[in-house]
Amino acid sequence: MILVFAMGIAALVAGFNMAVDPYLFFGMPRKPGFNQVKPAVDTHERLMKAYDAPRKLARTVILGSSRTDIGLAPQHAVWSSQYRPVYNLSLAGSGLRSGLLYLRHLVAARPVAEAPRTVVVGLDFEAFLYKPPAPGVAHPVAVRGEVEQRLLVQDDGSANPERAVRRLKDFGAAALSLDAIADSVATIAANRLAGGTDMAPDGHFSEAGFRDTTAADGVAALFAQKNAATTTQFSTPHQVLSDVAGGPIRELQTVRDLLAFAKQHHITVMLAIQPAHASRLNLLTQMGYWPDYERWKRDLTLLVDAERSADTEVTLWDFGGYEQYAREPIPADGDRKTRLAWFWDPVHYTSALGDLMTGRMLAAPGSPDFGVVLTPANLEQRLLQVRENQKLAAPAGT
């Protein structure tokens, strides 16, 4: 009798969680007022996109960190029929390697005729930095965790033998865990309220979290918190791009791997050096990273030029300068009413700025003169221009 009762309770719990589907594991329809908004994306984005993305036909895929996750909107009108549908496969807190893993996963899930034809990749300078290894100590070997286990293929493109077991574990967690019950209840509650953090059906991470935090704390507080965190993370020890001063930039190998995969699958790649607020760029200068920032752009430019010479369809855009958008004044401390048009904090740009970037990369009529395609011919002039524009920006003090 007790066993029957327990099984009945388990069935009710599983049915409830499956209907609400807070993690998008079951692919249940999203209904307004019930489960359309998915607030669990705040903590479960990698799980959600691992199962949601393969269900979606995407002609264009966006890769990157939380900056592209929030800033580049697939629903923006500038995406013409040539590029639609668009899916934002960005992952908060991730680097390019994770993006490549998820892209391989998405491509493996679809017939060849339905593979994406364009990939837009946001590049974060800080993601290429790492703490210098101690003398005689090798770099730690990457360990396959839950993220890698739930993807269809491994790094080399072969079938992932761990996926079946991982999928079974994820089923149990999504259907029967206490966390799933709590997130299902939170999902229903969020759908009864206006706004809130969400992941749209096209993978776009909503700006609601930043909007709410800005309203509560003010813009200046967000900038101060982010810049303080940056100082803590990157000041001591000074991080590096390569093991040996002036040596090959280690993380550029992932860029090469991405471009090789794209070439193999006839995918056009748009690489975008992401914009940052002037206060962030000034902070990098103060911490001694500006030479590395320019070196990173130089090496990216040379890599892309070599790939283009080998018939890889790739373009490198530089939005990482001191244009007017980056010089937007920060409101005074305590001001909770003023909003910035282009930035939420020093590195997370608004979807309004992301729309301008998208229009520029797609050569949409009326797009502003924002962003530069980097080539060996114009690289040094661009770097000089950024240095000159730096003089127009107020010192970082927030």
Image (cartoon, rainbow, N blue to C red):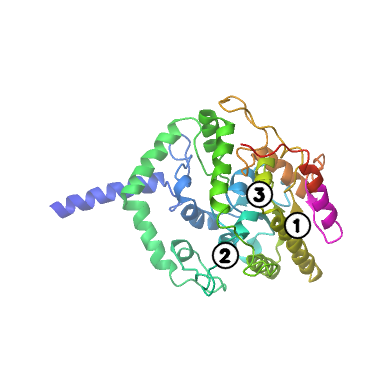
Residue at (41% x, 47% y) in the render = 21
Q: Is residue 238 magenta?
A: no
Within 10 Å of the Cα at label 2, are there few (<14), some (14-19), or many (20+) other Cα atoms?
A: some
Residue stretch in magenta: 371-385
The answer to whether any part of residue 203 appears in the image is: no
Label disc, if present, on residue 284 of the rendered structure: 3
Farthest-out residue, left = 1
Q: Residue 166, located in which quarter of the rendered image?
A: bottom left
Residue 96 horizontal side relative to residue 285, left or right: left
Residue at (69% x, 41% y) in the render = 278
Residue 3 horizontal side relative to residue 82, left or right: left
Disc 1 to disc 3, how far (Cα)? 22 Å
**Numbered circles on residues, count:** 3
In the depicted structure, whether residue 250 falls above or below residue 43: below
Disc 3 to disc 2, how far (Cα)? 18 Å
Q: Nearer the viewer, residue 27 or 220?
A: 220
Identify residue for label 2: 132
Mark 1 secondary-structure assignment:
strand
Residue at (51% x, 54% y) in the render = 49
Q: Earlier in the sequence, mark 1 or mark 3?
A: 3
Tell me which amino acid carries mark 3.
Leu
Image coords of residue 372 (percent x, y):
80, 50
Identify residue for label 1: 316
